[in-house]
Amino acid sequence: MESFESKLPNIGTSIFTTMSALASDHKAINLGQGFPDFQMDETLISLTHQAMTKGHNQYAPMAGNMALRESLSEKFFLLYNSSISPDCITITPGGTYAIYNALTTILKPGDEVIVFEPAYDSYIPNILVNGAIPVCIPLDFPDYSINWNKVTAAINKKTKAIIINSPHNPTGSVLSASDVKILSKIIIENNLFLISDEVYEHLIFDNKPHHSILKYPDLFNRSFVCFSFGKVYNCTGWKMGYCVAPPHLTNEFRKLHQYNAFSCHTPTQVALASHIKNKESYLSLSSTMQKKRDFFLSCMKNTSFSMLPSYGSYFVCASYENISQLPAKDFAIQLIKEYGVATIPVSAFYADGRDDKVLRFCFAKKEETLLLATERLQNL
């Protein structure tokens, strides 16, 4: 057989798959992968069932159900005072797909994309598969802030785009208004594109505002802003998201989208169009999840971990340097096998495996799950 040349020769099985499989094998509590272990809103389940029984089971329009896009447009105006046309919104099979499609829309071989690390694990493979080059800039440890001087120094004539993620996975850091101001200046002056991963927009804590790129017209004009319904409504397995971009970029985004997914699950779109109008369903999410974060942090005080700040997302990171000097992946495996708790080593979110002796915990779980996990960790 003729030899096959992989487009991603250095990419293997994701750390999430590896750790979840180990957790299953050892019957460990899975605080690694980012999914809730509690039931989603029964109302949304009922609305989806109703949509099916009423016959909404055939292809949705390629761009997405118009009623859903209109509901999102209304939501953007409420939250961000932004007048975003439904024609600028494309419904996608998940936020990760939206990010991939956006990158594929703009990238050509040899282009460079600035990525902040630790980074969500899809970014770099998405860039590489398009023949482009990721330029990785580490966030400043331990607060995981952006050093904008490093960003400016990394830009050259090959730079095509910057990816941001706020609230941030895996660290829970968030961008400030001053961050966005600097970012906007860099993007516009250097004629770059921006991919803004905002899947955790409603999971933001301690009264910090979410500075969506939708709030900044000049910056939005060069941006693809990606969102997830799964993270908002605790239904990650539905794989539903959307991308918001100005008309000229949306047009190009859809040229690819029509030949990849074409359209997404119709009854879910019909249900979401109605459910979004219940503002409390997303406005209450931050306080609900902050309570889980605070409960988890209070339980972790009885362990030897040093907790790092988390202002958003499903996650909080912790240093274990006072417990062990093992590499992060090895220590995470030890926790699964010997203590029955699965986490994700933050070193896995760096292309070069940078290891600050930090693990990521998912606190989007039932209180009894979090309590049992932290009781086990007290034995360290």
Image (cartoon, helix red, strand yellow):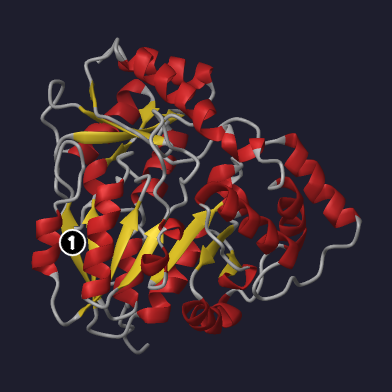
Toward the viewer: 30 or 184?
184
Quarter of the image with the C terminus is top left
Toward the viewer: 119 or 10?
119
Residue at x 31% of width, y 85% of height: 108
Quarter of the image with the N terminus is bottom left
- The x and y percentages for residue 221 are 41, 72
**Dot 1 lies on which element?**
strand
Toward the viewer: 216 or 109?
216
Extreme residue in the right direction: 54
Q: Residue beneath label 1, please? A: 136
Q: Is residue 323 visible?
A: yes
Horizontal side of residue 327 vs 290, given as left or right:
left
Residue at x 65% of width, y 37% of height: 281
Horizontal side of residue 110 vs 194, given as left or right:
left
Q: Quadrant of residue 351?
A: bottom left
Q: Which amino acid type is marked by label 1?
A: Cys
